[in-house]
Image: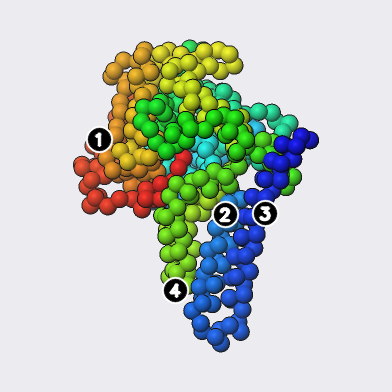
Amino acid sequence: MSKNGFRGIVSYDAMETIRNTNEWLGATARAIASYPIFAMVPHPALKLMGAWGRVTERSFARMVIKPGWQIPAIPGEDGQDHIVYVEPVIRRAFGDLVHFRVARREPRLRKVLLVAPMSGHYATLMRSTVTSLLPDCEVYVTDWHNARDIPVSEGKFDVEDYTQYLVDFIRHLGPDTNVVAVCQPAPLALAATAMLAEEDPAAQPRTLVLIGGPVDPDAAATEVTDFGNRVTMGELEHLVIQSVGFKYRGAGRMVYPGLAQLSSFIAMNGETHTRAFLNQIFAEARGTASEGDKHNKFYDEYLAVMDMTAEFYLSTVDRIFKRLEIAQNRFSVNGRPVDIGKITDVAVMTVEGANDDISAPGQCVAALDLCTGLPQDRKKQHLEPGAGHYGIFAGKSWRLNIRPLVLDFIDEHAALPDAVKPKNRRRRGGAAADCGVSDPMDSSKMPV
């Protein structure tokens, strides 16, 4: 083993050691403060110690646990609740195509493939998005795997492999599929659609909706794009790429660790997260916190991070952000050029948030200019006022305004009976009609 490889394993295991130690410290503080004899000493410091322990133990434990989907039952028109089953349709080494089957319900005519991001969080980040679509759609999701659990023998996985996965998934679902790509996969979903348009036109999706994705990162600068321009690829590889430790099945695989990504996420909004955790500790001490409160629901998902393969992370930074291969229509897969101008039949819609500081307005809508072969009547764009990054696919802005617009866009370009084309689905006034209160989830600015 090379010196650099050994150093990577030590670094990876060092991060896991720090995480494990903090989890243990939290559990110890909780246990000591809960010891019955201390009930005879009603000192507030003991309550705070126990509260700190509970919050700390839970937080650090969540970092290595994949969340479950936990989709609630869907109310049916017959008055019954229909249980939702998560069923893999295609199993692959680096990610599965899963279907959310609603029991005892006829399949919906709107077939939606949600392309989840591979950027440090699990696909369960889109749980609320899935739940909101299930009453009206048959929903499929790309469920990406944690790279630390994938043996080295499975080979590499970069942006070209990711794009090929999308091509295979869309081809399997058929031409009546409506693809909705959220954030990071937006440019690659656009490329996958262009590949199908040229190689297998009969398998193209019916519509493609791109939500807050960096199709052209240079269109509007953000902290994310500035970082990509400041750091060279050599520096990036040296600073963040590590080798998975011996604790996991993927031992020896080079990855961008989820814990490293999480530290970057938190640093972007450190004051907000610090305040949230202090408030939760005091709520625990007062006895007003609960298992399913807003803090726990959010951070159980936010803190659950996954490793990305080094080649995927590095090729994303290099080819999408630095060399702008999608933005300049110079992307290729396995040596074959991908011409986005070949898209001539698929209706394309872009959605951006006016307050998105991850993929700023202008980055996603650039996709429409790249679709030079697509008629204007098959293009649509929407800029959501006051919405942050998380809000445009899972927050209040999604629920009140964007989801109805997306369903209307799907219906407009689908050969569906009038019975499944509800009219005036969009609420008048949109997000502004909801008293102007911002979504609490937007304030945490969950990156995707």
* Marks 1 and 4, the one that precedes in the sequence: 4
* Marks 2 and 3, the one that precedes in the sequence: 3
Judged by depth in the image, the label closer to the viewer, 2 or 1, is 2
Judged by depth in the image, the label closer to the viewer, 3 or 4, is 3
Height in image: 224 above or below 73?
above
Residue at mark 3: 17
Question: At numbered mark 4, what does the secondary structure look like: helix, strand or loop?
Answer: helix
Q: Is residue 72 left or right of residue 151?
A: left
Percent across and percent down for residue 255 are 63, 37
* Marks 3 and 1, the one that precedes in the sequence: 3
CA neighbours of label 1 inside 10 A, class few (<14), some (14 to 19), many (20+): few
Residue at mark 4: 286
**For the residue marked with disc 1, what is the amino acid?**
Lys
Task: Kindly identify the residue that appears in the image at 48 percent across and 12 percent down.
Answer: 198
Q: How far apart in space, not on screen, are marks 2 and 3 (Cα)?
A: 15 Å
Q: Is residue 380 left or right of residue 164?
A: left
Judged by depth in the image, the label closer to the viewer, 3 or 1, is 3
Question: What label does residue 187 carry, if any?
Answer: none
CA neighbours of label 3 inside 10 A, class few (<14), some (14 to 19), many (20+): few
* Marks 3 and 4, the one that precedes in the sequence: 3
Residues at marks 4 and 2 touching, judged by CB atoms closer than 8 Å? no
Residue at mark 2: 62
Q: How far apart in space, not on screen, are marks 1 and 4 (Cα)?
A: 48 Å
